[in-house]
Amino acid sequence: MPLGNKKLLNAGCGPGPGHRLGRMLEAGAWEEVRLDIDPEVKPDLVGSISDLETFFPEASFDGILCSHVLEHLFAHEVYPALLQFRKVLKPGGFALVMCPDLESVARHLIEHGLAGVAYNSAVGPIRALDMIYGHSPSIEGGRHYMAHRTGFTAERLGNLLLSAGFTSVNARADAHFELCALAFMADANPKAILADLATSGFDLQEGP
């Protein structure tokens, strides 16, 4: 299949291609570049999202997908990482960022305790303890980079993205303890980007 005419950086890709945007990528208009700190997931490039400038020149990508990665950074590393997101994006680009929503995690913790199962995932039951501090079995198994070193609410993540130079941000939590933020560069076409993302099930239209 020929390479797409738009490039997506899957920053902290984990195993396999960007399944969160699978339908969008399968349509053929996008080429995915996978970067991860873990060589075992066989990324295109092994490295940290804190070091994007080492790998890519400015304005290399039309979009960035960063799914459940920012919380693995220390708090002081997040803003510099987002600055690098903006630098490697084209003027019409976007960043789609997902992470645990600490507000909904806190509500679950109060009601069910640290050990109360919030949901079941492909890697087993996920508890409040895992969402706050990182997936315990993975960390126990030696994958210490899976520990969580900071956390986000919609307000904090949105403000960080705006401070990093993104022109507008739509950040919201869903019913599954996940926070999702869509950040646009200055020359972005939000309508076209939202239409692309909608093919993979992302409904990120601004509410009334």
Image (cartoon, grey):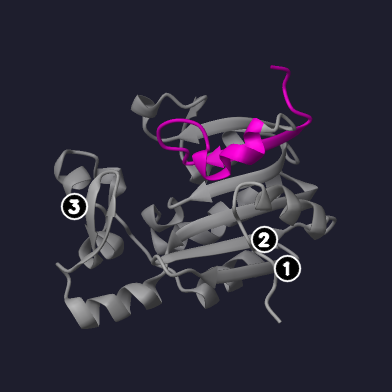
What is the quadrant of the N terminus in the image?
top right
Q: State which tag comes first along the sequence, 1 or 3.
A: 3
The residue at the point 58 percent across, 34 percent down is: 54
Say what amino acid the circle numbered 1 marks: Ser
Q: Residues within 10 Å of mark 1 (few under 14, many from 20)?
A: some
User: Which comes before the other along the chain, label 2 or label 1?
Assistant: 1
Cβ atoms at labels 2 and 3 below 8 Å apart: no
Side (left or right) of 21 relative to 109: right
Secondary structure, mark 2, is strand
Is residue 206 or residue 47 the one in the foreground? 206
Q: Nearer the N terminus, badge 2 or badge 3? A: 3
Q: Quadrant of residue 57?
A: top right
Residue 40 is labelled as none
What separation in Å lies between label 2 and label 1 (alpha carbons)? 6 Å
Tag 2: amino acid: Ala
The amino acid type, in three-letter code, at marker 3 is Ser
Q: Decide: marks 2, 1 in contact (CB < 8 A)?
A: yes
- The question of residue 44 being in magenta is answered with no
Do we see residue 80 in this rendering? Answer: yes
Q: Which residue is mark 1?
A: 168
Residue linked to disc 2: 183
What residue is shown with label 3? Answer: 136
In x, y percent, where is residue 3?
72, 22
Magenta range is 1-26
Label 2, label 3: how many angstroms apart (C-alpha)? 30 Å
Q: Nearer the viewer, residue 203 or 180?
A: 203
Q: Is residue 101 left or right of residue 189?
A: left
Specify few, some or many for label 3: CA neighbours under 10 Å numbering under 14, 14-19, or 20 or more. some
Image quarter of the C terminus: bottom right
